[in-house]
Image (cartoon, rainbow, N blue to C red):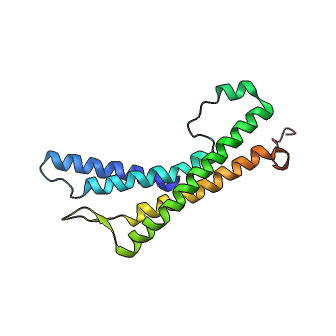
Amino acid sequence: MVVAAMWAFLLAFYILIDVVGRAFGFPLKGTHELVKNAIVMIAFMQTAYCVMARSMLRADFILHLLGGKPERFINSAGYILGALFFAGLFIGTIEPAWHAIITGEFEGEGALRVPTWPARVVVLLSAGLLVINYMILALKEILPSYVVEAEPDIAG
C-alpha cells in the first residue's frame, strides 16, 4: 500500500512534467505507455490492503439488519467467491507473466520502450495475495470463536 501510494505520488509529478513540457513543445516520450502500466500496478498493489481492511466496495446496510449467522454466512460466501475470482486471475496470469519475462515483452515504440513484465508480475503476486486475504476473512467469518481479537485495555 505504501509503495503504491508513493508510486502514485511520483507518477503525478511525472504527468505534471509531461503536461508542462507539452505546453512548451517538449513532451516526455513514452508517457502514455508508462502511465498505462503504472496505473494497473498501483491499483493491484492497493487492492490486497483494501480487502484486509474490509474497505472494498460493498453494500452492507442490509447485512447489518440481518446480523448474526445470516450476516456471517453472506460474508463468508462473498469472501469465498472473491478468493475464487482472484484464484482464476492468478492462474490465468501465470503464463502471460512468464512469457513477458522470458521474451522481454514491451510496449511503445521509439524513444521509450516500457517492459510489460513488471505490471504482469504485480498482477500475479497481488492476485495471489488477494486469494490468501479472502480466505483469511472467510475463515474469520466461519470460525469466529477461534479467532482471537485484541481486547482494549480498560484498566488504565
Extreme-left residue of the structure: 25
Please state the total of marks drawn on the protein image.
Answer: 0
Residue at 30 percent of width and 52 percent of height = 14
In the picture provided, is 49 more to the left or to the right than 37? right
Camera-side residue of 154 and 1:
1
Task: Report the quarter where the C terminus lies.
Answer: top right
Residue 144 position (above or below residue 100):
above
In the picture provided, is 150 more to the left or to the right than 40? right
Percent position (x, y) of residue 22? 17, 48
Camera-side residue of 107 and 76:
76
Percent position (x, y) of residue 153? 83, 42
Extreme-right residue of the structure: 155
In the picture provided, is 51 more to the left or to the right than 16? right
Q: Quadrant of residue 34?
A: bottom left
Residue at 40 percent of width and 70 percent of height = 99
Residue 2 position (above or below residue 91):
above
